[in-house]
Image: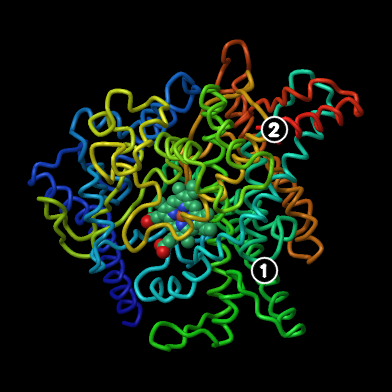
Amino acid sequence: MLLQWLIGVAGVACTFGVSRLLINLWWRPWQIYKALQAQGVRGPPFIPIWGNQPEVVRLMAEASSTPMNLSSNEIAPYVFPHYTRWSKIYGEMFVYTFGSEVRLTITDPELMKEILSNKFGHFPKVSPSALDRDLLGDGLVLAQGEKWAHQRQIINPGFHVDKLKAMVETMAKLSTKMLNDWEGRIVETKQPNGVEIEVREEYQNLTADVIAQTAFGTNYQEGKMVFRLQYYQLKMAQEERESIRFPGQSILPTAKNIHRRKIRKAIEDNLRQIVEKRLQSESQNEVQHSDLLGIMITAYKGQLRGNVQKSLTMSIQDIVDECKTFFFAGHDTTASLLTWTTMLLALHPDWQERARAEVIKVCCSTHPSSDMLNQLKLVGMVINEALRLYPVASTLTRCTNRDSKVGKYVVPKGTVLYLLLLATSHNKQLWGEDASNFNPERFSGGIASASKHPLAFMPFSVGPRNCIGQVFALMEAKVVLCKLLQRFSFHLSPTYVHAPAQTVILKPRHAWTYPIGALFLPDVQSRRRWPRSKILVLRRSSWRSKHQTHLSHQGDLQGQKWSHQGSHIKAKDSKLRVSHPLLMLYLVLKNHLMLKMH
Ligand code: HEM
């Protein structure tokens, strides 16, 4: 009797579970799809459960199997091949399914504005994947609703213009340190034509150092493990995006998921140490810091007041989550922007010269001040053009939490709105026939008049959830470029391979140069977390072999192996062709005098 009863209960539970699964994976997406199609939005045929994901993955693998032609900046077919294919067949606004997610692709700036500026919370962010949550925590980028509003209120003062202005000096000093190192390499290698620099890696380290020092009062070395593990998480996220996933795959106890959780824990432990160290030093020295970490710690102590004298508080876990967000968003984005800008300037020596002339006129050979940065108009135009052609955040996603109006359409609850900033900033109707050409001149009259729609260019998004670090990023980019142009001329290395890829952000596909096992192990092992051999063997070897297989698939490029060169440029200081140290000293002094005379 009991057995029969148990079987009966299990049967009902099973039927309930299966029917819920079918509703979520099949019925609901199908209803959304039909509702959109009934309003004239077309798209590839509806496929239940996996949707059009296998087709997207196949098209992406096909597109990225060869490097891109450097003569064109038309990256949409390379980065989003499915968009290029389907928009030609079904129009700019089309619908497709990715797993059980129904995605509505939007490229019209007017509709984007409507979605991003909505004040009633109708278009929240999409629930992040487990990997995205590991990477960014429940910090400002991913938080929703009241929690987001609360956190943003606490963090905003950390990005006031006066605070940012005070950071210019640190940015300039750290850039100089990096460039001194480049110069050292030129001297060391005695290469008459200069040395090859992997700029993506250099910029990553530099921008990591800048955010660590300016926002957290620490430095790259202290946060190194976090930064590097975050790159690893990013790599995993990229792999996940480019493979077919089963629903619920991220919660299964697979080796990959276990490893993922261990990495998350290692990052959190490390960040907690940084926070605790600051807490200790504040209580020992009885000082309160005013950087971002200092502001958050004041909130933790319950000493921060909001607009209406309301107490603004944070827990240690909240701070750790924000640290994750700012460690990542605060540097990898700017590193990408700098990489693409350097690449474009390397390809366009005329613009490199014009920008250099401006830098020398405004700043001579000194560190730039924030006022000088404001005068660097051409450099600003170059940065904008780089952000237009290579938008670091090339997509934004939102979803509908009720049936909502978007333009003339009623978009059903549960639809994912896929805003393709990249397509908008390359659109020929908005930017003219030369949309994919590098032409900073188009920004000479300001952003609003650069195209036919004032919001065709919104690399930092608009509305309440726009980028909090926009001014910080642009300042930093200007400082680094200013210092670079002052000291070096550069062109692309013949081994450069052009392969932009969309991970969480747009970056060179093969810029994964981190021997993560080696870095990760000593620290973890010293705390007896994981046996050294296991991690070393498992992660390093599996990563390597995968990478190498990938490389061997790519074939030859003009006689050279299509390898993971990422973003090499040849940094060539025309003054440093001769290797003798005394002669070098003479040339550096001469250069200094020449710069002073300008
Ligand atoms: C070239 C550099 C950067 C670009 C292109 C960029 C772009 C963006 C975009 C498009 C968003 C909106 C995301 C969305 O709505 O889903 C965003 C949000 C955000 N960015 Fe940036 N960003 C850059 C640099 C930075 C830096 C340097 C920081 C920190 C120092 C930062 C911190 C953030 C944060 C915390 C958010 C979330 C804001 C919120 O939702 O309230 N970003 N960024």
Name the residue: 55% across, 28% down: 352
Q: Residue furthest front?
A: 597
**Residue drawn at the location 63% of the way across and 18% of the way down:** 494
Residue 305 screen position, x and y as percent: 47, 85
Q: Nearer the viewer, residue 477 or 257?
A: 477
Quarter of the displayed picture in which ligand 1 can be seen: bottom left
Q: Which residue is mark 1?
A: 269
Is residue 251 in view from this perspective? no
> Residue 166 location in percent, x, y?
61, 62
Residue 482, above or below 124? above
Work out whether 45 lies above or below 302.
above
Q: Position of residue 203 (x, y in %)?
A: 63, 43
Q: Which mark is residue 597?
A: 2
Vertical position of residue 178 compared to residue 13: above or below: above
**Measured Cα–Cα span from mark 2 to mark 1:** 53 Å
Amino acid type at image mark 2: Met
Q: Secondary structure at mark 2?
A: helix
Q: In the image, is 386 to the left or to the right of 14? A: right
